[in-house]
Amino acid sequence: MFPWFMRFLNRGEAVHIPSVAELPAEAPVEKSLMESHQTQSLISVPMVSGSVLIGFLGVDSVRQARSWSEDVIRLLKIDAGSFANALRHKWDGEALQRANLELEKKVEERTRELRKKQSQLVQSEKMASLGQLVAGVAHEINTPLGGSEVTSTFPGALLGGSRRFYPMEIRNVRILPSTSSRYWI
C-alpha cells in the first residue's frame, strides 16, 4: 500500500519526514496521500511485538514543516513499545479467554458423555443382577429339592417284592435308580 514508508517500518526504523514537499521520487503514493491531508511534516515509529510489526505510531504537522529531535523520536519509540505491549497483552488475554471458553465447553461435553455412560453402566449392572436373580430363581424352580438326598425305606412288598426302579413323579421330579436300597431324588 505504501511501499517506501513500509520499507523503513519493516526494518524497525523510524520514518522522519521534515518536509513532505521534499519526499524522494520513490515515494509518490506517500507524497500524494500526505499532500491530500495537508500534511507538512511527519514522524512515524514502528510498533513491534516480538519481531512482528503490528502497526506504527506517528505524529504529523499540518500548519508548518518541522523537524523532530532525536529525544522526541526516542520518546515516541518508547510510547510505541508501550502501545505494542499493551496490544499484545490485550490480544493474549482475549486468546486466553477464548481458550478457556473452549476448554469449558469440552469439559461440559465430556461430563455429559461420562454421565450418560455412567447411567448406561448402572443400567447394564442392574440388568446383569436381574439376570443372575432370574437364573437363580429358575434353577430353584427346576430343582426344588436340588442337592438334597432323600432316602426311601419302602418295604420290598410295597414295590412288588423287588428292589427295581419304579419311576414315579413327585412334583415334576423323577426318582432315579440306585444300586442300593436307597432312592435318590
Image (cartoon, rainbow, N blue to C red):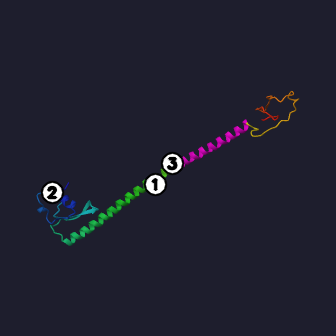
Residue 104 disc label: 1
- Numbered disc 2: secondary structure: helix
Give me the disc on residue 32.
2
Q: Marks 3/2: CA distance? A: 63 Å
The structure residue drawn at horizontal position 21% and vertical position 69%, both measured from the top left corner, is 73
Closer to the camera: disc 2 or disc 1?
A: 1
Predominant SS of the magenta segment: helix
Residue type beneath disc 1: Glu
Q: Which residues are magenta?
A: 115-142
Q: Position of residue 105 (x, y in %)?
A: 45, 52
For marks 3 and 2, the one nearer the N-term is 2
| Pick the front one: 174 or 172 | 174
Residue type, numbered disc 2? Ser
Q: Going by the image, does 18 lie left or right of 167?
A: left
Helix, strand or loop under label 1: helix
Query: Quadrant of residue 167 in the image?
Result: top right
Tag 3 near tag 2, CB within 8 Å: no
